Amino acid sequence: MSSHQPDNSPLRAGSAADVFVLLWDTLSNILGTAATATLMARAVKRASPSTPALADLFITTKNFTYEYRLPDSWRVPESAAATGAFDRLLEELAPLLTALTGHVVLRQLARLDAFASKGLLVEQEPPL
């Protein structure tokens, strides 16, 4: 099981795509790609109604390989719309991670500079 960006376009420093890749890779190393894909897809589904910019983010499986396709706009450095969409995704992902792992994974993510500055990975009580 692996992940990749099918279009192989380069990531630019400071883009939402950079942070998404860091999140995907970190979660995949901790939880595995199947759990990462499942949690991310669920977070996208939960966040999409209020964040139309997530409609072009796809997480799929093909022959037991988990893949994602990011919107092209996420590769633009410091795009406010892309960053806002990523932050909304992270807001939905945090309670899912808390329910699954307690605070262990959120604490590990919060130690990474890209997430520490966001302040979105505060310790939360698991959803009921």
Image: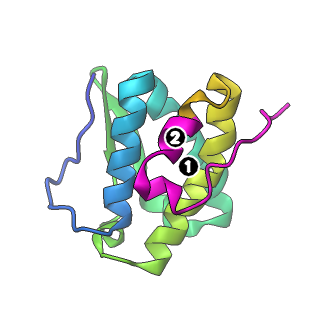
Report which residue position mark 2 lands on. Answer: 41
Task: Specify the color scheme.
Answer: rainbow
Query: From the viewer's perspective, is 33 left or right of 93?
Result: left
Question: Quarter of the image holding residue 93?
Answer: top right
Question: Quarter of the image holding residue 72?
Answer: bottom left
Report which residue position mark 1 lands on. Answer: 44
Q: Residue 47: horizontal and vertical position, in percent? A: 63, 55
- Taking the spot 49% from the left edge, 42% from the top edge, the residue there is 109
Question: Quarter of the image holding residue 105?
Answer: top right
- Taking the spot 15% from the left edge, 61% from the top edge, the residue there is 10
Q: Residue 98: horizontal and vertical position, in percent? A: 67, 33
Residue 122, which numbered label? none
Cα–Cα span, label 1 and label 2: 5 Å
Q: Amino acid at mark 1?
A: Val
- Taking the spot 62% from the left edge, 24% from the top edge, the residue there is 101
Task: Tell me, yes or no, whether the highlighted magenta stretch contains residue 122.
Answer: yes
Query: From the viewer's perspective, is 101 left or right of 83?
Result: right
Element type at marker 2? helix
Q: Quadrant of the C terminus?
A: top right
Q: Amino acid at mark 2?
A: Ala
Residues under numbered marks 1 and 2 in contact, where contact means CB atoms less than 8 Å apart: yes
Please state which of residues 43 and 13 is positioned toward the viewer in this rendering: 13
- Taking the spot 31% from the left edge, 75% from the top edge, the residue there is 77
